Structure formats: C-alpha cells, structure tokens
Amino acid sequence: MTEILKCISPVDGSVYAERPAAGEAEIQAALDRATACQELWREMPVADRAAVCSRMVDAFVQDPDAVAGELAWQMGRPVRYGAGEVRGFEERARHMIAIADEALADRAVAAKEGFTRFIRRMPLGVVFVVAPWNYPYLTAVNAIVPAIMAGNAVVLKHATQTPLCGERIARAFRAAGAPDGLFQVLHLTHDQTARVVAAPEVDFVAFTGSVPGGAAMERAAAGRFIGLGLELGGKDPAYVRADANLPHAIENVTDGAFFNSGQSCCGIERVYVHEAVYDDFVQGMVDLARQYVLGDPLDTGTTLGPMVRTRAADFVRGQIAEAVAAGATALIDPKAFPRDAAGSPYMAPQVLTGVDHSMRVMTEESFGPVVGVMKVKSDDAAVALMNDSDFGLTASIWTADEGAALALGARVETGTLFMNRADYLDPALAWTGVKNSGRGCTLSVLGYDHLTRPMSFHLRTLV
C-alpha cells in the first residue's frame, strides 16, 4: 500500500499538502532517466549549461509572494521574510553559474618538452540531493546548480515538511527548457531515501540535515565508495569583545539568534560577552527580544512565527526548564507573548543568563528561539568556550579590531569565521564545517571540486 506523506502546517495544525511516496518503479525510472540524460548533458558546453540554469533562475524568481506564502504554510516563516529566500536563491545560483568557467577550466601544470599535461574536472554522474525544510530553497540550491553546471544530473528528495519547494524548482527547470531527466523530484520515505543512496545509479549524495541523518547517509552508502557531502548541525557561538560596537552587536546577535525562530544551522545559539560590556549587552538583547511579534506567519506584522512543529518547540522548552532548574535565569516572560503556549509550536524568544556548559542548552543543538549568554574575563576564556563543542559550523567575533578577530578566529574550530556579522552564506566563500557539523564543501570555486572528479591527461608527442 502506498504511503501518503503529509505536510502538517505549523500555522494551524492542518494538512497543507500531501503526496504519495514514489513507487519502486517510479524511483527506478527516475534514476534511469537521470543516467541517460547525464550522458548527453556532460557533453554540453559550459555556456549552454549556464543558459539553461540562468533561465531556470529567471523563472523561479517570478513570484516571490507565492513562495513566501507557501513557506509560511509549510514551515512557519513569516511572509514578510519569505522573499528573502528567493533573493538568496538567486544570488547563490547566479554566482555559481558565473564562476563555473573558472572552476571547471583545465588546470595546467608546468611545461615539459614533448608532453601536453593538464588536469580536467569531470562530472560524477547522478547527484542525489537530500534537502531540509528550514531553508528549503537556500540549502537545495547550494548543490543543485553547481552539480548541473558541472555536467551532472540531479535527483532531489526534499523534506516531507516542504514538498512544494522541490516541485517549484522542477517547474522552473521545465520552463527553462531543461532536457528530460536533468532535474527530477522524488517524494520518498526515509527507507526509500536510504535505498536511493545505495542505488548503483547514484554517484554522489549531498545531504543537509541532522547529525543522526548524516550517520544514516553514511550507513546507506557504506561500501559504495561514493562521495558524501554532509552539512549537519551547529551550536554556533558569538563572542562580544569589550571594544565591540555594542548597538550593532546587540541588534545583529539578537537577529542571528531568533530569525526563523532560531531554526538555522548557522544561527547563533550561545553568546560569550566580555565582562566590561556584559550588563549593557544583556539588557539590550532582552529589550530587543521583547519587541518581537509572535503570531500567525501569514500576518505581515508578525516577526516571529511558529516553530516547525510542536515536538520541536517542546524540545526547546525542555532545555530551558532544565537550565532554569540548574540555576539559570530566564529573562523573558513568555506570558508577554499571548500565542506562546505549552503543547503549541508557537514559542516566545528566550534569553538565559547564569548558564554554563553543564547545561544542554549550551552544548546541544537547540534549533529554536533560545540563547544562553555567559560572561567572560578574556579573549582566551572566550575561545576556550567557543571550542568546547561537538560542532563547528560558524562562529562570530564582534569587535572593532580586525587584527584581533583574525588572530582569535584562527584559533576557533569552525568552518566559517565572521566578524561583526553572522548567519549568512557568501557564495564566493566555501561553505563547510568541522567536527559534527559535517564534511565536504559547497559554494565558491572549491564547491565544484566536490561535484567533479579530477582526470589527468598525460600526452606524449612522438617526433
């Protein structure tokens, strides 16, 4: 019997969308189409690939309001912010298209008389992209566009929570005149996803999700010797130095902690503040957090929507309750946010002080609108605490001294080091993580290296 995959909207608990899980014959047909298409697509000049991808982006950006509404219903992001994901999708896609010639160009080696030698980047084949719900377009585009630009075909499995997102990208590719099989969407169960990872037609897996999800990908791919790109969780720290521009730090650290209801892999989840500015920083952050409007994400006045599901909100509430029981202080009264209620995905922002690393809220990924703030006496103390984590996706330092940020940042175990900003992916820079935040790389010219294989050409001229 076919399993029906349902998107339960966090807005009101209704079934917003449902799709039947693909049948085994449908899955095999999709993989066969991808394989056949890729054999032809790999021969297409990069300029021709760019033309198709550019037309896809043109089609995708036509209706940002519709995208915003769908996102609000599927995962709860306020409609006032939905268009930002469309802009980010376009920025990343167009950048990866623009740099493809450079990234995929033959790499010369030193001249040697009588020989022609170079290294060429060759496509892998079929790339299976497994994308999450929290930034459903931004996470997917990181792999989709460079994979196709590199000469691969793509099969996308999107989160059950956001089934319309993959379908919207597929429509954009069809509008762009993409050949049949170049980009396809499958609605799959977890077991089916594992079987596709293990399928011989799949040559690379790009996964964004949880640490347990990444482990499941590795188990499914065991013994296949294919590449895995794993962007996993984060517990990203911020350090506010004594010389920081405090109003700027307060505004941006608060936004980095609570945007998207804290449901961001690279959102700020813990803050270390120098004792000289600690009190002022905490007061400013609390004052700003109290200004959020928690409510229906379809209302343009809402600045904080529901979390994706009640279970996720209750998990965060449990972290907060444990921390308070262990001596932490919760500085925001949830009663000031009428929509906040136990057993509901609507959850008020929370700032905790009196925290330490014995508490789960400071060590375990929260993925919700809560942040712990600790006082530190020195740069060294801050760096030690920043590194005291199983994760290493991003970290931020807030300071007027770029030299200090560079010196301290080199000591922080992270994939991206920010100064005076956070929670942003620059497509010109490699997006990567260390420790349990994953492995591999997307975006930038380096991202193309993971979606291709090197082939050496060693040609000898006989006279």
Image (cartoon, rainbow, N blue to C red):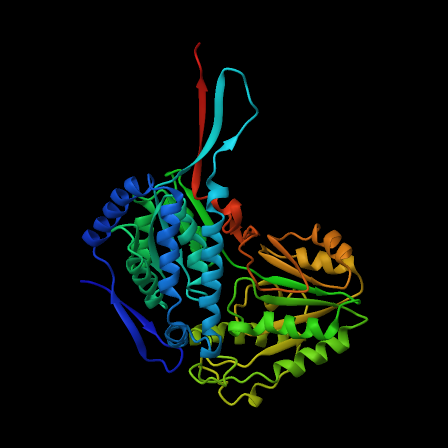
Image point 60% across, 66% down: which residue? 268
- State the residue lying farthest toward the top: 463
Q: Count of labels shown?
A: 0
What x and y, as percent, mark residue 87? 47, 66
Can residue 200 be spotted in the picture?
Answer: no
Q: Residue 25 in the image: state x and y as whole percent.
A: 18, 52
The answer to which of 170 and 22 lies nearer the viewer is: 170
Residue 249 drawn above or below residue 23: below
- Asked if residue 25 lies left or right of residue 385, the reply is left
Question: Residue 74's image quarter?
Answer: bottom left
Q: Nearer the viewer, residue 462 or 3?
A: 462
Q: At x 58% / y 64%, what residue is drawn?
A: 423
In the rendered image, residue 430, in percent from the top left (x then y), is placed at: 55, 50
| Residue at x 57%, y 25% (from the top left corner) | 110
Percent position (x, y) of residue 307? 46, 75
Instruction: Report whether 383 appears left or right of 228.
Output: right
Task: Report whether residue 64 is seen.
Answer: yes
Left-right relation of 453 to 361: left
Image quadrant where one finds the C terminus: top left
> Dividing the image into 4 quarters, which one contains the N terminus?
bottom left
